[in-house]
């Protein structure tokens, strides 16, 4: 199937082949149609496009730079390793790209209140930031377990003026925070926009969130061409829901020589069942309003995911990833907690950059791929987030006393 | 014509609304659920909805969420749901209410056939949109069961017509914008919604969400063909000191609600 046919399919109610779509209560259809229309018209509206671009220039800090990781590359088969520095964005990750876009859409739709889910807190902090900037009320749903593990981010969100609601239902993690946010949305849909944080959920979220993140790949492609004179051999990114990966992949999909490799959270190892590698270890199903790969049991009940990285600890994945995987355009591999933490320490010590643990999965993948492709290869990694939020987890993992 | 279709013909002839009671399979236990079904029937309910407990019930409030957790902990899956359906449908028209993924996992055609084989009249699918229903509508036709969709106060008229044209058995009208659970009063939006649905279809219309008392049932029965009660029964079981008392409370509540649905007109 050609790329243009693929685009046509995605236009039919947000389907990506058999994936995507809308599996939601009828109560939300009106809001999803309104959002779809607001997104569609805003993309064609020069004033919207320039307002977002100006925000990215003066607030986010775009374009984000490239950094060559020469010392780290010695551990990756000597390949040329190039980092796309989304960690240098305001709030410390790629998440800001999406929330600024959605916050502008919220205003465009005349809504005054946003709700968001968060796992590690990165999307919650980004949402609270955008809400503060634009004068919107903000409520963040966060699993009770995560509020304890990420107390610092809870405080950050509160300082930014957001209300943080600990979710005590189900497994008390990200999946349940999404459930609770959807319940809020069903109840308050007239006044409220649900600022979903990844390329999952019902149409138009997977398409819209991708559109707000695809700037990563657009910048990267031009920057790499300027730096190296050619396209890279491979582009790598970590995949939980998959927003940073789709963001950097999308501009390269029509470049057939560029391998696109997503690194999923292998937890204790896919074979143990304790992982969050949804494409590697899951099966097609419906979760949170979209059809994609899902970690599920024989009755279609969602299985709890496991990862050292709260941001990848999700039993679903964006439907576009599922489709790109099935047609063979992208590849996915699982990286265990230990492999990710090894790469986390290595980048810190060889480059002076402490990555988010999510991002460390992509770095571990680069060590494998670099060894496979050899020293003539050019490998780009989306350095999706910085590791400040993970210092406590990492200290505990490496046995560094904090008192 | 399903047993559910026949029921609505009968209650129309009696100029009253039908009382439809909901219980998740496997709650409070497998055998306990079967006893609740018997208590429903003893109390005079007209039809039963067997809930398929699901790990991520985004349309449900805390009461049904908690019941679903209990039911899943009790090992409830398709087999247990179908067994409860079979027991209920031996006495009254019965349907299954389920989120979509368990159906897709089981196999769409196979699920519809299993519903029919166990005496079920239909399936309520609260998160299945008509756009995603192509295979499902065909499966329900092949197995001669009713595909029942849920509409909401926010559903626009043009869309209501599209949804009700795919519906069979009855149209499930959610009384308010929100999740399941008992409320102090039934939303005034319910009457408006039912009136708007009537303009699009001759199918019976049942109202759910927030109904828990005889007075509320009476109020809804004035304009709807069916009154759906779920959380109030579950709460009666959860609040009882033991199962025996819980079952008594269920029968008593069913009796009261059965009076309510006969007093509306």
Image: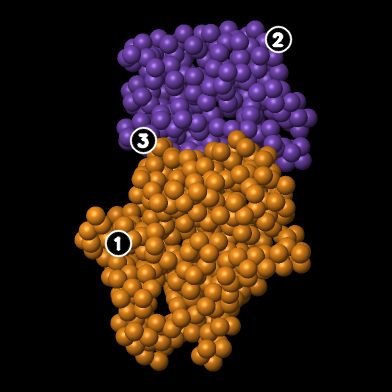
Chain colours: A orange, B purple
> Is disc 1 placed on a helix, strand or loop?
helix
User: Badge 2 local density, few (<14 within 10 Å), some, or many (20+)?
Assistant: few
User: Badge 3 local density, few (<14 within 10 Å), some, or many (20+)?
Assistant: many
From the image, tell me which residue sits under label 3. Answer: B72
> Is disc 2 placed on a helix, strand or loop?
loop
Q: Which mark is residue A394?
A: 1
Residue drawn at point x = 76 percent, y = 64 percent: A47
Measure how far apart labels 1 and 3 are at the Cα level: 35 Å
> Is disc 3 placed on a helix, strand or loop?
helix
Judging depth in this view, the residue of B26 and A125 nearest the camera is A125
Relative placement, left or right, of A95 versus A400 is right
Q: Single out the mark in the foreground, 1 or 2.
A: 1
Measure how far apart labels 3 and 2 are at the Cα level: 40 Å
Q: Are marks 1 and 3 on the same chain?
A: no
Residue drawn at point x = 52 percent, y = 15 percent: B45
Quadrant of the snapshot with the C terminus of chain A: bottom left
Q: Is residue A20 above or below residue B230?
A: below
Quadrant of the snapshot with the N terminus of chain A: bottom right
* Protein chain holding label 2: B
**Residue B49 at x, y = what percent?**
50, 26
Could you say which quadrant of the image residue B128 lies in? top right
Q: Are marks 1 and 2 on the same chain?
A: no
**Residue B197 at x, y = what percent?**
73, 30
Measure how far apart labels 1 and 2 are at the Cα level: 68 Å
């Amino acid at each position: 199937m050609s790329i243009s046919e693929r685009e046509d399919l995605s236009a039919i109610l947000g389907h990506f082949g058999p994936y995507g779509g809308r599996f939601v209560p009828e109560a939300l259809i009106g809001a999803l149609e309104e959002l779809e229309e607001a997104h569609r018209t805003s993309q064609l509206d020069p004033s919207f496009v320039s307002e977002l671009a100006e925000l990215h220039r003066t607030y986010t800090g775009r374009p984000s730079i490239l950094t060559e990781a020469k010392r780290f590359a010695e551990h990756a088969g000597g390949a040329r390793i190039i980092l796309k520095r989304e960690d240098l964005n305001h709030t410390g990750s790629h998440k800001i790209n999406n929330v600024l876009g959605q916050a502008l859409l919220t205003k465009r739709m005349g809504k005054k209140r946003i709700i968001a889910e968060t796992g590690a807190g990165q999307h919650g902090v980004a949402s609270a930031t955008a809400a503060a900037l634009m004068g919107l009320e903000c409520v963040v749903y966060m699993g009770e377990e995560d509020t304890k593990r990420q107390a610092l981010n809870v405080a950050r969100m509160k300082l930014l003026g957001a209300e943080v609601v600990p979710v005590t239902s189900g497994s008390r993690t990200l999946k349940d925070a999404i459930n609770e946010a959807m319940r809020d949305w069903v109840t308050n849909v007239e006044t409220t926009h649900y600022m979903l944080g990844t390329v999952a959920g019902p149409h138009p979220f997977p398409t819209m969130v991708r559109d707000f993140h695809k700037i990563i790949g657009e910048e990267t492609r031009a920057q790499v061409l300027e730096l190296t004179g050619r396209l890279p051999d491979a582009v790598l990114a970590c995949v939980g829901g998959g927003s940073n990966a789709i963001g950097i992949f999308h501009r390269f999909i029509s470049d057939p020589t560029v391998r696109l490799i997503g690194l999923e959270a292998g937890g204790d190892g896919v074979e143990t069942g304790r992982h969050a590698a949804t494409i590697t270890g899951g099966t097609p199903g419906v979760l949170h309003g979209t059809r994609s790969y899902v970690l599920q049991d024989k009755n279609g009940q969602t299985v709890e995911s496991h990862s050292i990285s709260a941001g990848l600890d999700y039993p679903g994945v964006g439907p576009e990833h599922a489709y790109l995987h099935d047609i063979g355009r992208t590849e996915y591999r699982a990286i265990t907690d230990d492999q990710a933490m090894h790469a986390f320490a290595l980048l810190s010590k060889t480059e002076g950059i402490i990555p988010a643990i999510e991002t460390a999965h992509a770095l571990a993948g680069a060590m494998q791929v670099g060894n496979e492709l050899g020293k003539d290869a050019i490998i780009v990694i989306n350095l999706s987030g910085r590791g400040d939020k993970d210092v406590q987890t990492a200290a505990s993992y490496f046995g560094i006393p904090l008192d | 014509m399903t047993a559910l279709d026949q029921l609505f013909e009968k209650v129309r002839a009696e100029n009253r609304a039908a009382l439809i009671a909901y219980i998740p399979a496997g709650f409070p236990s497998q055998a306990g659920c079967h006893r609740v079904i018997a208590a429903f029937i003893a109390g005079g309910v007209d039809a039963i909805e067997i809930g398929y407990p699901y790990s991520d019930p985004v349309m449900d409030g805390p009461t049904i969420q908690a019941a679903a957790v209990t039911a899943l902990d009790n090992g409830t899956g398709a087999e247990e749901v179908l067994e409860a359906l079979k027991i209920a449908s031996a006495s009254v028209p019965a349907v299954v209410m389920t989120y979509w993924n368990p159906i897709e996992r089981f196999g769409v055609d196979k699920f519809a056939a299993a519903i029919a084989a166990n005496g079920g009249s239909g399936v309520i699918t609260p998160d299945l949109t008509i756009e995603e229903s192509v295979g499902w509508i065909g499966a329900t036709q092949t197995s001669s069961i009713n595909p029942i969709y849920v509409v909401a106060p926010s559903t626009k008229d043009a869309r209501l017509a599209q949804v009700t044209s795919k519906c069979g058995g009855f149209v499930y009208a959610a009384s308010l914008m929100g999740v399941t659970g008992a409320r102090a009063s039934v939303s005034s939006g319910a009457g408006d919604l039912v009136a708007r649905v009537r303009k699009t279809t001759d199918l019976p219309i049942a109202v759910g969400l927030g109904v828990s008392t005889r007075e509320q049932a009476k109020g809804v029965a004035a304009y709807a063909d069916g009154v759906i009660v779920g959380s109030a029964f579950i709460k009666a079981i959860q609040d009882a000191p033991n199962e025996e008392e819980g079952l008594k409370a269920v029968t008593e509540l069913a009796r009261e609600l059965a009076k309510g649905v006969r007093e509306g007109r």
